[in-house]
Image (cartoon, rainbow, N blue to C red):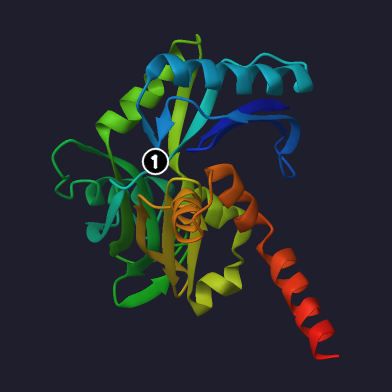
């Protein structure tokens, strides 16, 4: 297939980041361009002003394209927000031949897709947790194994269609198409979690400016996905109110420099005791 150019946009509440990478058939992708700009028109993962959001996305993409010295025509876009929800579902099919093929796996996943979808929502991800062939469960990669019945236990992530449509509209106004959407928490899990952590059981919590994404793993598979409409900005506001500070900027400095402030307090206490 040769070298491909990939683009991605992470749309957060405080900043928008665009990344451009190259990928070959073998090896990991190589980042060749990245740019972050303050997010405008976005609040708690939702578009609240299309024109401002389009301008912010355009600035981020332009910066990444200048660094990479390429122009991209499509991107993957991150999705977050309090309305992200999930559920687990199982589905089963008869294996076409004596052993499981790629088509069998695709068919059983497609059957799992028939789960009732909340009104106004779209399926964002169908993530297989494990497969069962006849009476043997706990299978992670069933292709090539023999049996007569294939079952999948999968995790399904839903997002409101209004969120994805508005994000797509912002990107398409720039003449760029959206390849797909990805839940920010799922992308985080790929970036920071090891297979051992997922197998032992781990909860990933990504605290952003306006939202907090959560993913729970057990025995290597996802069991829960969600997003809360609270983040670092809420901590800043609470600090400003609790410490009676004159501005949110001062509260943000206190939050970011908390360790240095506490270390200085400890040194002062030691000096006083001397």
Report whether residue 64 is seen.
yes
Left or right: 60 in relation to 263: left
Question: Percent position (x, y) of residue 101?
Answer: 41, 51
User: Left of 28 or right of it: where is 221?
Assistant: left
Give percent across and percent down for residue 116.
14, 48
Residue toward you, 219 or 1:
219
Q: Is residue 212 left or right of residue 122?
A: right
Q: Residue at x 59, y 74 (%)?
A: 196
Is residue 171 something one can see in this rendering? no
Task: Name the image quarter holding residue 164.
Answer: top left
Identify the residue under disc 1.
Answer: 44
Quadrant of the rendering where the C terminus is positioned: bottom right
Out of 31 and 5, give the one closest to the viewer.
31
Q: Residues within 10 Å of mark 1 (few under 14, many from 20)?
A: many
- Provide the secondary structure element on which disc 1 rests: loop
Residue for point 43% across, 61% down: 215
Q: Residue at x 43, y 52 (%)?
A: 234
Q: Is residue 117 above or below residue 75?
A: below
Q: Is residue 244 above or below residue 129?
A: above
At 49% from the left edge and 64% from the top edge, which residue is drawn?
204
193 or 229, which lies in front?
A: 229
Q: Is residue 197 above or below residue 208?
A: below
Name the image quarter holding the N terminus. top right
**Callout count:** 1
**x, y (%) of residue 83?**
28, 45
**For residue 91, which quarter of the picture?**
bottom left
Determine which quarter of the picture holds residue 94: bottom left
State the image coordinates of residue 183 (x, y, percent, origin top left): 43, 45
């Amino acid at each position: 297939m040769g070298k491909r150019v990939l683009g991605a946009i992470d749309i957060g509440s405080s900043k928008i980041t665009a990344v451009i990478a190259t990928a070959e058939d073998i090896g990991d992708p190589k980042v060749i361009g990245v740019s972050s700009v303050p997010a405008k028109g976005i609040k708690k993962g939702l578009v609240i002003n299309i024109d401002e959001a389009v301008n912010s996305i355009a600035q981020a993409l332009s910066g990444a394209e200048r660094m990479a010295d390429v122009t991209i025509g499509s991107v993957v876009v991150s999705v977050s927000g309090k309305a992200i929800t999930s559920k687990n579902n199982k589905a089963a099919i008869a294996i076409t031949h004596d052993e499981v093929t790629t088509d069998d796996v695709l068919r059983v996943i497609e059957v799992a897709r028939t789960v009732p979808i909340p009104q106004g929502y779209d399926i964002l991800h169908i993530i297989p947790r494990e497969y069962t062939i006849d009476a043997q469960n706990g299978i992670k990669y069933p292709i090539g194994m023999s049996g007569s019945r294939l079952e999948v236990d999968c995790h399904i992530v839903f997002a409101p269609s209004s969120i994805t449509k508005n994000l797509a509209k912002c990107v398409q106004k720039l003449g760029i198409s959206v390849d797909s959407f990805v839940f920010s928490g799922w992308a985080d899990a790929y970036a920071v979690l090891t297979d051992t952590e997922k197998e032992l059981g781990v909860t990933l919590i990504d605290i952003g400016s306006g939202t907090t994404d959560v993913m729970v793993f057990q025995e290597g598979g996802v069991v829960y996905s969600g997003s809360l409409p609270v983040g670092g900005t809420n901590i800043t506001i609470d600090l400003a109110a609790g410490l009676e500070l004159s501005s949110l900027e001062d509260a943000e400095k206190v939050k970011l420099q908390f360790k240095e402030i506490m270390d200085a307090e400890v040194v002062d206490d030691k000096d006083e005791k001397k």
